Image (cartoon, coloured by chain):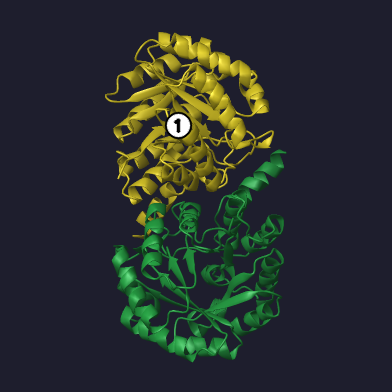
Chain colours: A yellow, B green
């Protein structure tokens, strides 16, 4: 049976949601612990500078990640300027993102989707040979401002993007966690049929409404081989105080290994790394497997 | 698109896990509120007498449920003696259960699986015309004592049971919550292929490891039309203190309606009933949708 590749996003998507600054050495320690647990893809940081003070140490964190054997360390780059900084710091994998929903894109990166399409083309054009590109479509199912996003909007946006540069892994992101698994499956099915030359598909989900595992399973069942998740479910949603954030890596590893789908991750070591993540001051955590295994161990 | 029928099990599976006695009038009030939310199938009680003092008021609760228009009220009956009491009290739908795993069956009903097969035949033989029968296979995927249960064990057990009485809805139950969705899908696929004359299939899942929604989606995707769930995720697992119990009805309704699969349930009214369930002293609750919608309403 084919395996699954989990992209650990706690060091970027997760840390970004944490208020108190996490000392750089602690960030690097967590990146190393996650790598030691077997994770070989990680979104390690973003060069967004003053916009997100938590990630001001992007060059140091990236440098440490690039030393880890076999780690594919991706860097989130919302514009050309950020991509330049990332490349100058040695990034070998950049992840561009834009939102399918116009109000979310304006709010998030202060650009219309059409402007972001041009940014994507610029970034793609400036990448040296061998640097990998990922294309994240945020709010691909649902927008915090506009509600449900029609599949046609996403497919048309991909038409425009992939005509400019088709050699990128494409991630469809359930930014709000409000997608249901049937919709996740249907959008991937439609997108894969329309864009058969995309080299790889990924799913990024949130567990706010308890659909993290169901949506990842639905995506995987359609042939998606790359699933984003954050250790300890680290994250948070600014539009829903108290709601949890990213799908938990522990839950994803538990689910896929329980289906005999290899993840390459050692669950006990991941649980250890997840405990360090959950212990960060200001951490909003989620997922069920950490607690369930702790309770089972207590009862035994 | 075909709909889904949700069997609300909080009044039996959920209440049974609550320590302090819930006054009979309060139980009946919750059954009525769940019915008012649109739920038309409910496991309302069990005639287990002194073994479970929480359900000592089974005759009164069943009588109240039988008055609700359009409600298919099922009663859990682990043996002939219990079925006699249920029928005497007017039950029109009895649900037998046994465990696929021998140690769990011995622990739970003090019988070997072979003895339970005979009990099933006895109960089936004594049912008056028009009384419906459900067959629950507990630990169909995993046993708290013996670990993973091989699919062949379940299929062989169904061979024996269905040869004696084939006119029953069959529920495969993930008692521990440790099944992964790929295994749930695979077992239903195998069982449906081997027993094509079974009139209906159901799935009963727990959310202890965060797989409640994923497993229900997997079952539904294979053609399962009946899904068990408990309002507010009421339940609990005696083998994992602090772990949550049944899949939450709110999460199931949210998921299926989000896929345009009709449930017949009014979510705002269900949330109201779920709040009453969650407020029961000693209630162990679960699920994500209740909290996420509350947080979203607070933020708006």
Residue A84 appears left or right of A35: right
In the rendered image of this protein, does residue A131 appear above or below residue A285?
A: above
Q: Residue at x 60, y 41 (%)?
A: A242
Q: Is residue A136 above or below residue B91?
A: above
Q: Quadrant of the C terminus of chain A?
A: bottom left
Q: Is residue A279 visible to us here? A: no
Left or right, A248 with respect to A146, comes to left
**Quadrant assignment, res B230:** bottom right
Report whether A205 appears left or right of A100.
left
A173, B57: nearer the viewer? A173
User: Dot 1: what SS?
Assistant: helix
On the image, the x and y values in percent for residue A114 come to 62, 18
Numbered disc 1: what chain?
A: A
Asked if residue B267 is positioned above or below residue A73 in the image, the reply reads below
Q: Badge 1: how crowded within 10 Å, few (<14), some, or many (20+)?
A: many
In the rendered image, the residue lying farthest to the left is A69
Count of residue discs? 1
Residue B58 visible in the picture:
yes
Q: Where is residue B237? Give x, y as percent.
A: 45, 63
Left or right of B286 in this view: B79: left
Which quarter of the rendering shows the N terminus of chain A? top left
Residue A289 position, x and y percent, is 42, 49
Where is residue B233? Give x, y as percent.
56, 59
Name the residue at 36% across, 74% down.
Answer: B158
Q: Which residue is mark 1?
A: A10
Of B11 and A291, which appears nearest the observer? B11
Residue sitting at 42 percent across and 45 percent down? A221
Residue at position x 44%, y 13% in the image: A86
């Amino acid at each position: 049976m084919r395996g699954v590749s989990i992209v650990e996003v706690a060091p970027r998507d997760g840390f970004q949601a944490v208020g108190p600054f996490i000392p750089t050495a602690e960030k690097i320690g967590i990146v190393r612990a996650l790598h030691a647990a077997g994770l070989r893809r990680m979104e390690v940081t973003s060069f967004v500078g003053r916009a997100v003070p938590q990630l001001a140490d992007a060059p140091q964190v990236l440098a440490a990640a690039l030393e880890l054997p076999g780690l594919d360390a991706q860097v989130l780059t919302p514009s050309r300027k950020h991509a330049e900084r990332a490349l100058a710091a040695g990034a070998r994998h950049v992840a561009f993102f834009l939102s399918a929903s116009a109000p979310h894109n304006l709010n998030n990166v202060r650009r219309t989707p059409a402007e972001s399409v041009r940014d994507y083309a610029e970034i793609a054009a400036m990448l040296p040979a061998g640097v990998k590109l990922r294309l994240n479509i945020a709010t691909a199912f649902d927008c915090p401002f506009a509600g449900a996003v029609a599949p046609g909007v996403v497919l048309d946006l991909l038409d425009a993007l992939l005509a400019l540069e088709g050699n990128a892994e494409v991630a469809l992101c359930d930014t709000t966690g409000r997608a249901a698994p049937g919709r996740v499956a249907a959008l991937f099915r439609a997108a894969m049929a329309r864009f058969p030359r995309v080299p790889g598909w990924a799913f990024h989900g949130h567990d706010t409404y308890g659909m993290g595992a169901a949506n990842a399973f639905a995506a995987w069942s359609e042939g998606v081989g790359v699933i984003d998740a954050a250790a300890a479910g680290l994250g948070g949603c600014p539009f829903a105080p108290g709601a949890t954030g990213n799908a938990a890596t522990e839950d994803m590893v538990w689910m896929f290994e329980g289906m005999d789908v290899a993840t390459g991750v050692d669950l006990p070591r991941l649980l250890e790394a997840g405990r360090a993540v959950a212990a960060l001051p200001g951490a909003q955590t989620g997922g069920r497997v950490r607690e369930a295994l702790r309770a089972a161990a207590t009862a035994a």
